[in-house]
Amino acid sequence: FVSKAPFFGGLQVLFANPPKVDMDFRGVGNLADMPGVYGKVRQVIDDAIAQVMVNPNRIAREMTEDPKVDLARLKAPPPEGVLRIRVVRAEKLEGRDISLFGKPSSDPYVQIKVGGETFRTPTLMKTCDPVWGEDNVHDFVVYSLEQFVQVDVFDWDRIG
């Protein structure tokens, strides 16, 4: 409690979850819309935002000189808890890689995001029913109960 204006001691600015950023490149920037390039540019921008402003990262400022205000606690508040996620298997994925002598297959991997942190499983080659096993475990520190868990399954490709 701060007894005089501004009546609060500090300010935190952050996103609980990665924001959705809409991009449209124009002029010479249209080169970034090319397949393979767009994804890389988007990843660089998303990572830059996450490293600065997606939970647990934040911008924190003292708003008063009151000694009761703890800037360290503003910058690094205690977590709510830990979320342990284990990726074991997937079944009946769509075959995205064409084969001349057999059914289409995929080279799947799973990417999980919680706040500004990302975990990625190993890529399993040529399977639509991947089994990663019991040792694909990752612990995410959760700083807000508003944080989402985003799970994506991708097909790895050498190009793009």
Image (cartoon, grey):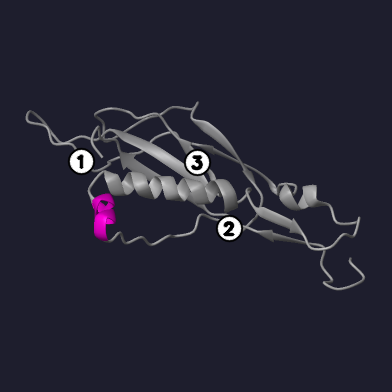
Give the farthest residue toward the bottom: 5
Residue shown at the point (75%, 53%) measured from the top left: 74
Residue carrying label 3: 118
Which quadrant, please, contains the C terminus?
A: top left
Give the farthest residue toward the left: 100
Say which element carries label 2. Answer: loop
Q: Amino acid at mark 2?
A: Phe
Q: Amino acid at mark 1?
A: Arg
Of the pair 87 and 67, the residue shown nearer to us: 67
| Comes first in the chain, label 2 or label 3 | 2
Of the pair 115 and 41, the residue shown nearer to us: 41
Residue carrying label 2: 15
Q: Name the chief secondary structure element in magenta.
A: helix
Residue segment shown in magenta? 27-33
Does the stretch in magenta take in 30? yes
Q: Measured along the vertical axis of the image, is residue 33 above or below residue 123?
A: below
Residue shown at the point (29%, 55%) measured from the top left: 29
Residue carrying label 1: 96
Q: Position of residue 55 (x, y in %)?
A: 61, 51
